[in-house]
Amino acid sequence: MSLNQDAWWAVARSEEVTSEKPLSVDIGDQPVVLWRDNQGIARAMEDRCPHRRAPLSLGCVRDNGWIQCGYHGWSFDGETGRLKEIPNMKDQQRFPPVYKANAFGVTEQAGLVRVCLNPNVAAPLVAARRYDYCGTANVSLTHREYLNALYDDPSLLFSIRGVHFTSYLMAELHEEDGKLVMERSCQWAGMHWPAHFVAEFPLTLLTKTDPVTGETELLLRDDEFRSLFHAVLAPVPSARGVTAVRWRASQGARYPGLRGALLRGINPLTVFSSVNGTKLRTTKPSVSMNGEDLREAIMEGAQPSPGQTAAA
Amino acid sequence: MLEVADRPTSHDDVSTTNSGKGTIALNAVNHWVPHDIVMRDTWFPVAHNYSVTGKPVRRAVYSHPIFLWRENGVVVASENHPNEKVVGEKSQYTDARGRYPVMEHYGVVWVWFGNPLAADPVHLPSLPFLPPKGGLPRHMTSTVRFECAAPISLENLIDLTHADFLHADVVGDERSDSETVETFFDSETVTMVRTCTNKSVAPVMKFFSGIKQPTQNVRQVIRIYLRSHCAIAYGRFTPGDDVPLFHPCTPETRDRTRMEMVMNTTNSDLLFRHVMPKAGYKVSRQDSYMTSPQSPRYMRDTDRKDLHSKFDQAGQRYRMAMMELADRQAKGDFAYRDNVSADCSEIIGLRKELFQF
């Protein structure tokens, strides 16, 4: 797939990037190696040694913060990608400028490490936030299909303990501050009337999705407009059509009673690593039908026309 | 440092004319697609001779099936299993009965892959450290597989600086007082000689051969027979042992390699003699750790050029020599211009007195 080279992809959670062992991730078909240098700064480079194409992620991080290929021991500086040392070369460690690997832009905010394939693009500012829970799921679904499933039926992709997502929307998919926004009505799980006979819903799930990366904020609110639960879901297109999803979540306002206790206990969010194919196949496209057009319109910078919202 | 990485692409022509003889330009090594190289008219080692009995065993060269068994003690190599109902045409590499030319030598079964009429024992690689009639104990032999193209495995072998990293726990790290690499080649072979003085002693020798000194002088030779994908890896360690290894990389398919390894440790002490050949199991997994992910990255030609260091001269020469030979074969020229069976003892610096048969 062709990827936006200027996008910032949340490819790892902060705690996954260490100076102990390089981490291998992908952005589409581009393998990326991540590590933390001796100053604690996250670095990202192409996961391919320019010498003999071995994955750099199979190597190690040196005490001085350089990454060293495990095959022949070539060492690279993460900031510039420049080759710094070839073992056995003794004191002849000066190399022409072409002796480098591709270094990528990296920024680390709110517990996520974001990488941009174009190192010259300024990093976005993300509000700092405290998160209680986090996780990673690799789903064998393309990035586009993952987002379409998110629009049409989020229960295909994740669950929030004690919460039932209905098929009724409080706000159809629309553009808001450059994001694809929609709000879905929810019920408390357990005994409840079928959603189609219900006059009032006690909960809503607000989703705000970046049109380029698909990074999505989830906000669960009750009918008093209290924020009960907040999460960030970062789907990144990966090798072989897999979507790698990093997520972080935090509790919000305290909801009283047993329902609130269910939500509060241990982490209530489960992001699935596999998708129920039968359910996915029979989920009729609704929101996603127009979601793609709306997404493209936002990316082109055009004002979506009034009819260009995704009704459901 | 070889400045091939930043040459303009106009220098990348695969064939250039040099004294009227087709050669490969140096920069062509950056268009190395080992999976596209298919060698023929050569003897491939396919089995240790003890593996071939009355019951057929199956092997492959470039996906061509080869069944081996013995009839009255004589090895037979056929493209069909004796129980197989033959349908379709037979391959161009076998005789009227569908049989490949086959011979036993050095304790190994060799199959001729190419024009059957051109099969000649004179094209068998010289392996002067192995008894011509075989007979080494089985513990000095093993079969190892690699998930990569055979030329990738051989390129891995001919650049021994990788051993200081991948195999440091077996052969010692990169520390030495001096290191030189020399390369010799003809149209059928590439030979690399690496000499290190006061190199960190190989742990395997420290523990199993009783070497007490912290360093040793090392002379390592890698000799590759291009067509048959056979290699000799001969290390002379002082103090220490002489370790000659037969390291064939038979291309079972274009991306999978089989090695019928023979290491002659006859001259070593009892413990080392038994342990060292087993090191192949560990070392080969370490190699695979890199060559398996490396191999698919060489399946397609790319404009991106590999970078090289001065230690890659032998590897680059290997790439060029293979491409040159493949180029010749593509033009229908399968003749040998150099004799691969001529005794190579002198070239590899074999201490003949240790290997008298």
Image: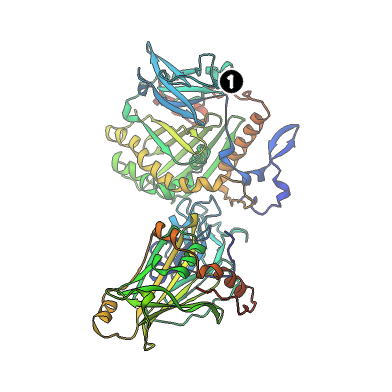
Question: Could you tell me residue B39's position as x and y percent?
Answer: 57, 30
- The residue carrying mark 1 is B115
- Residue A259 vs residue B265, the one in the foreground: A259
Q: Residue at x 39, y 33 (%)?
A: B242
- How many residues crowd mark 1 within 10 Å: few (<14), some (14–19), many (20+)? some
Q: Out of A237 and A141, give the one closest to the viewer.
A: A141
Q: Quadrant of residue A161?
A: bottom left
Looking at the picture, does residue B32 appear above or below residue A98?
A: above
Q: Is residue B48 above or below residue A56?
A: above
Q: In the image, is B220 to the left or to the right of A228?
A: right
Identity of the amino acid at label 1? Asn
Could one spot residue A249 in this view of the protein? no
Q: Secondary structure at mark 1?
A: loop
Find residue B170 and report its horizontal and vertical position in percent: 36, 45
Where's the C terminus of chain B, which quadrant? top left
Viewer can see residue A75: yes
* Chain holding disc 1: B
